[in-house]
Amino acid sequence: MTLDAVLSRIDADLPQATERLLELLRIQSISTDPAFADHCQTAADWLVRDLQSIGITAEKRETPGHPMVVGHLEGDGPHLLFYGHYDVQPVDPLELWDRDPFDPQIEETAKGKVIRGRGSSDDKGQLMTFVEACRAWKSEHGALPCRITFFFEGEEESGSPSLVPFMQENAEELKSDLALICDTGMFESRVPSIVTMLRGLLGEEITITAPDKDLHSGMYGGVAMNPIRVLTRVLASLHDDQGRVTVPGFYDGVHELPDDIRSQWQGLAFDHGTFLGDVGLSEPAGEQDRTPIEMIWSRPTCDVNGIWGGYTGDGFKTVLPSKAHAKVSFRLVGDQDPHKIRNSFRQLVRDALPADCEVEFSGHGASQASTTETTDPAFEAARVALTNEWNVPAAYVGCGGSIPIAGHFQDILDTTPMLVGFGKDDDQIHSPNEKYDMESFHKGIRSWARILDALT
């Protein structure tokens, strides 16, 4: 059978596939730091050569930032686009790594073999699962079973500033029947999953100024307004006693879960006690009338991600600061409008300011949530393919994180995104000692081969 031959090829060629991934992981493609710009170019060049080695017409496309890689392979059947990103997060603090983050190695752990190194899970390892599936298929049959476009980005970890303009300028070239994204994970590290809900993201940085200079708290304390006092009062007012966000109009566009989705999620038997216990907590802190899994996947949030002001060094300095700062993020769901929420939040802050205080805002991103309908038969075909590979019933799940590219495929290209990933909860992405399970890499390649077969 066609598929059996491809799966056998994947098994036989796993050592070579692993070595190719290790080679890509050695490239220090940190997109946020200009010092690594040449390394991002190197990574893009490496991917172009690798795609060309399979017979794919591929090229590097320059942008104002880091380059895109675009490849095309003609074929019959549906047109699939596969998206991944080759850039990685910074590696600091280096002293917390057990080895050089760009000297990847295969390690034996209590849970089996892993590939250790920056980008191994997010997203180079995941990206290469699809490429290796295509390589194996082409090796066995000389051609792939459908038309495929490869689309690799180099700025995902730094906000994707070049992505939307590039997609708009090249929309006709990138349009497809289905956009495959491999930048997610498995449910509780064991259930293969197709993500159908992604939260949007809105970021705001606040600076409140009271006196025009730092003051001696003995001379001015009590009579001069302290901006930290003002800021903390504002931040404390963002939630009520039941965990609901108090920003006016915040819940406009938030929809209730469909009964079938709620039932499926309940069937996953999510253990929130273990989930919180693994990070030293015990009680869910969100909306008290919602289940923990709803809080993570389908409810909006407001979180303070950073707060500072005054003297924060060693020792003690009795300063009354001139300025106080905070970073606040909102995870959005349904049809929430990030721009309306931004305006409402800023007005809430302004209304809370006493005399003699001023506020400055700096916005950081404003992406809407993304929801994918699973009525397209491709989704059930992919779910069955995943079930057959992992011998565990695959599930449609939500994701608490934000992957703006999914929404861009919908809005700019009018293409339905399908998010399938093989990351595990303990992969430590964005953290020291990032890893990718060899099982995830191997079975991920096999999974994509099964999905290609099922979709064509």
Image (cartoon, grey):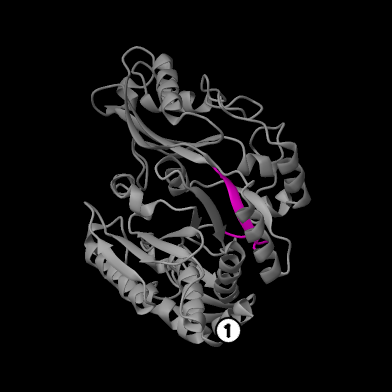
Res 379 visible: yes
Residue 201, how many percent across, how many down? 46, 39
Q: Amino acid at mark 1?
A: Asp
Query: Compared to 289, does 180 lie above or below?
Result: below
Query: Compared to 7, does 399 lie above or below?
Result: above
Q: Nearer the viewer, residue 349 or 12?
A: 12
Q: Which residues are magenta?
A: 185-198
| Quarter occupied by residue 288 | top right
**Mark 1: few/some/many CA within 10 Å (<14, 14-19, 20+):** some
Q: Nearer the viewer, residue 222 or 32?
A: 32
Q: Which residue sits at x=53%, y=31%?
A: 335
Residue 252, how many percent across, how many down? 55, 23
Residue 380, how many percent across, how many down? 66, 55
Q: Which residue sits at x=51%, y=80%?
A: 141
Horizontal relation, residue 10 to residue 380: left or right: left
User: Magenta includes 197?
Assistant: yes
Circle 1 is placed at which residue position? 11
Q: Nearer the viewer, residue 2 or 45?
A: 2
Res 320 visible: no
Q: Which element type, helix, strand or loop, lies under badge 1? A: helix
Viewport quadrant of the C terminus: bottom right
Query: Compared to 414, does 234 lie above or below?
Result: above
Residue 261, how many percent across, how many down? 71, 43
